[in-house]
Image: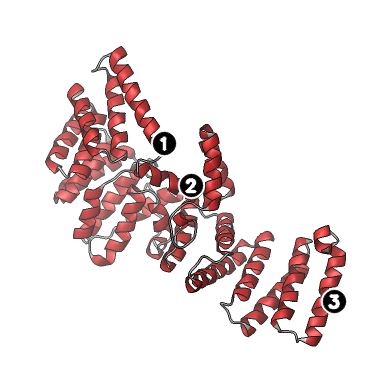
């Protein structure tokens, strides 16, 4: 009571007397005595007396390990408390392994009791904040946590729990804010990215899942807006005006992202009929045919027409190289990848990640060393460059068929990092990727 009222000196005196009495009557390592040790440490930490709290937290932890065992819930509480103290003091490197140990222990307990331990969410959040202070990027934090939770049948996408899917309580509160003020979604997301990286990542995953299911109101609203813009441009500028064609192309791409493939192809076809040599339309339609329809002949024709119209388009060179690779034309694939790399001259952007990944895939399929290209790709990721996401199912299937099993696991996750949402998080947590050395973008290809 004195603690609640703010009389910390009086509370500390009572806590010390209770501890001394417990030590005399029960012994220094009785569970009740250790509870008193822990309570006094909590009080001292709340007063800012970190030097006084630290030895008490360590005493409670060491004794609970001996008496109760290393995975007892009270022992894990001591692990978490000591981690929290180190975290407050800025010793994030010291706190990290303790937070990890506490989280692993609570995950095991949750499986044993067949429900989420009540302290699990807080432990996940504390560990995520610690990783953030250590300089980890949000997607790296997500990947680390997912890798820890997956063996226990848990996922951050289910709010860190077991059983039915659905957003966490914290995310539901955020979504309620967004519902009342949709225009502030970006502002809310940016604030979460800075202050609550775990919740930010859960929000991003929820948005993507809703988009993929076509259930996100914004996705439908954007579709309606694109249709309206296309209609207005047709009426004002005419059906063949470049801006009208660009609107058709944007409409087709959005329909494709919603998995409305037949509608998307109809719009791509319409755009190509109106502008047969438009390199953006040709390139996007070719990529669609390659990866959605598996129509390699149709894709090849459009890629080559686009490159004939604009030979200095590095994106179409890269995408066509991917088509050549899956078609078995490895020499032609290498030729276009080299041309794409020459054109970008080491430029760091999201499309260059594809060029480097495809060159690594080509090297791997030939039994050559891909470390240069993967190292350069890692340099881009380390610089904060994020891929321009898209589906590339033909490359994914090629890796499964052609790459040796020992390398397939790594290349499959690298593929996901370049082409799929949240793939980079999984890659960052992979030991074989962590072992790859970053390489300068200016280092010449052999």
Left or right side of 175 for 7: right
Q: Nearer the viewer, residue 86 or 81?
A: 81
Q: Is 440 drawn above or below residue 232 in the view shown? A: below
Q: How far apart are the alpha carbons under marks 1 and 2? A: 15 Å
Closer to the chain start, of discs 3 and 2, is 3
Asked which quadrant contains residue 60, the reply is bottom right
Is disc 3 surrounded by few (<14), some (14 to 19) or many (20+) residues within 10 Å?
A: few
Q: Residue at x 14, y 49 (%)?
A: 327
Judge the density around disc 1: few (<14), some (14-19), many (≥20) Cα neighbours within 10 Å.
Answer: few
Q: Is residue 366 visible?
A: no
| Earlier residue among tags 1 and 3 | 3
Which callout, 1 or 2, points at the residue further toward the start of the chain?
2
Q: Using the image, tell me which numbered label, if any, was put on residue 203.
A: 2
The quarter of the picture where the N terminus appears is bottom right
Cα separation, mark 1 vs mark 3, equals: 61 Å
Disc 1 vs disc 2: Cβ atoms closer than 8 Å?
no
The picture places residue 24, in percent across and down from the top left corner, at 81, 86
Secondary element under disc 3, as helix, strand or loop, is: helix
Q: Position of residue 307 (x, y in %)?
A: 20, 33
Q: What residue is pinned by disc 3? A: 17
């Amino acid at each position: 009571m004195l603690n609640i009222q703010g009389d910390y000196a009086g509370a500390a005196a009572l806590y010390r007397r209770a501890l001394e009495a417990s030590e005399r009557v029960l012994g220094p390592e009785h569970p009740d005595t250790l509870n008193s040790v822990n309570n006094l440490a909590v009080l001292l930490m709340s007063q800012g007396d970190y030097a006084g709290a630290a030895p008490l937290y360590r005493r409670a932890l060491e004794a609970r390990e001996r008496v109760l065992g290393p995975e007892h819930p009270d022992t894990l509480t001591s692990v978490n408390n000591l981690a929290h103290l180190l975290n407050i003091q800025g010793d994030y490197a010291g706190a990290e392994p303790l937070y990890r140990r506490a989280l692993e222990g609570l995950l095991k307990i949750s499986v044993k009791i067949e429900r989420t331990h009540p302290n699990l969410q807080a432990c996940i959040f504390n560990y995520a904040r610690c990783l953030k202070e250590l300089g980890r990027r949000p997607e790296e934090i997500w990947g680390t946590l997912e890798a820890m939770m997956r063996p226990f049948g848990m996922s951050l996408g289910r709010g860190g729990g077991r059983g039915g899917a659905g957003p966490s309580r914290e995310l539901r509160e955020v979504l309620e804010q967004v519902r009342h003020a949709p225009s502030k979604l970006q502002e809310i997301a940016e604030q979460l990215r800075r202050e609550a990286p775990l919740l930010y990542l859960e929000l991003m995953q929820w948005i993507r899942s809703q988009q993929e299911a076509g259930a996100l109101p914004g996705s439908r609203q954007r579709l309606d807006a694109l249709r309206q813009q296309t209609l207005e441009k047709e009426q004002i500028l005419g059906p063949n005006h470049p801006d009208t064609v660009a609107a058709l192309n944007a409409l087709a791409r959005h329909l494709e992202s919603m998995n409305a493939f037949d509608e998307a192809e109809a719009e791509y076809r319409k755009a190509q009929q109106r502008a047969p040599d438009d390199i953006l339309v040709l390139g996007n339609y070719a990529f669609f045919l390659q990866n959605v329809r598996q129509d390699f002949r149709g894709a090849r024709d459009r890629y080559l027409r686009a490159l004939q119209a604009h030979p200095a388009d590095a994106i179409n060179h890269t995408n066509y190289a991917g088509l050549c690779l899956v078609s078995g034309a490895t020499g032609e694939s290498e030729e276009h990848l080299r041309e794409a790399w020459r054109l970008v001259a080491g430029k760091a952007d999201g499309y260059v990640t594809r060029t480097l990944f495809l060159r690594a895939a080509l090297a791997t399929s030939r039994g050559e060393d891909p470390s240069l290209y993967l190292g350069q790709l890692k340099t881009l990721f380390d610089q904060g460059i994020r891929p321009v996401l898209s589906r590339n199912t033909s490359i994914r299937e090629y890796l499964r068929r052609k790459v040796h099993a020992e390398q397939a696991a790594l290349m499959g996750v690298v593929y996901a990092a370049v082409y799929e949402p949240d793939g980079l998080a999984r890659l960052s947590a992979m030991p074989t990727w962590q072992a790859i050395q970053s390489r300068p973008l200016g280092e010449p290809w052999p």
